[in-house]
Amino acid sequence: MAIKNISIRLDEDMLHKLHYIADYEGRSANGQITVMVRGLIERFEQKHGEIPINKNDKK
């Protein structure tokens, strides 16, 4: 699986709180975001079914 990069914009307070939570959990901010996105996808798929992966449709 290839690792892709994305860029996000956060206000200073949100970024500070993200770093606080990541430090508390023993993760980097990137690792914390990955855990959060993975959880979001799992919850979505439990409710709506598996999201199909079509490599030609990815953004």
Image: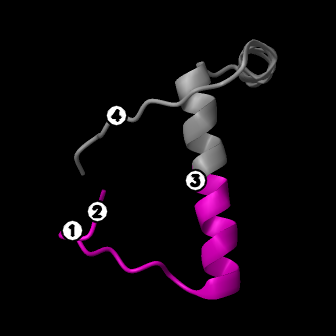
Q: Residues within 10 Å of mark 2 (few under 14, many from 20)?
A: few
Q: Which residue is mark 4?
A: 5
Residues rendered magenta in the picture: 38-59
Q: Circle 1 is placed at which residue position?
A: 55
Question: Could you tell me residue 13's position as x and y percent?
Answer: 81, 16
At label 2, the amino acid type is Lys
Determine the CA span between mark 3 and mark 1.
19 Å
The quarter in which the C terminus is drawn is bottom left
Question: Residue 52: x percent and y percent?
Answer: 38, 80
Q: Earlier in the sequence, mark 4 or mark 3?
A: 4
Q: Which residue is mark 2?
A: 58
Q: State the residue at coordinates (63%, 32%).
A: 32
- On the image, the x and y values in percent for residue 44 come to 65, 72
**Three-letter code for the amino acid on which mark 1 is drawn:** Lys
Above or below residue 47? Residue 58 is above
* Residue 21 higher or lower than 16, as above or below: below
Disc 3 packing (10 Å; few <14; some 14–19; many ≥20): few
Q: Which residue is mark 3?
A: 38
For image coordinates 57% across by 86% down, the residue present is 49
- Residue contact between numbered discs 2 and 1, judged by CB atoms under 8 Å: yes
Badge 1 element = loop
The amino acid type of the residue labelled 3 equals Arg
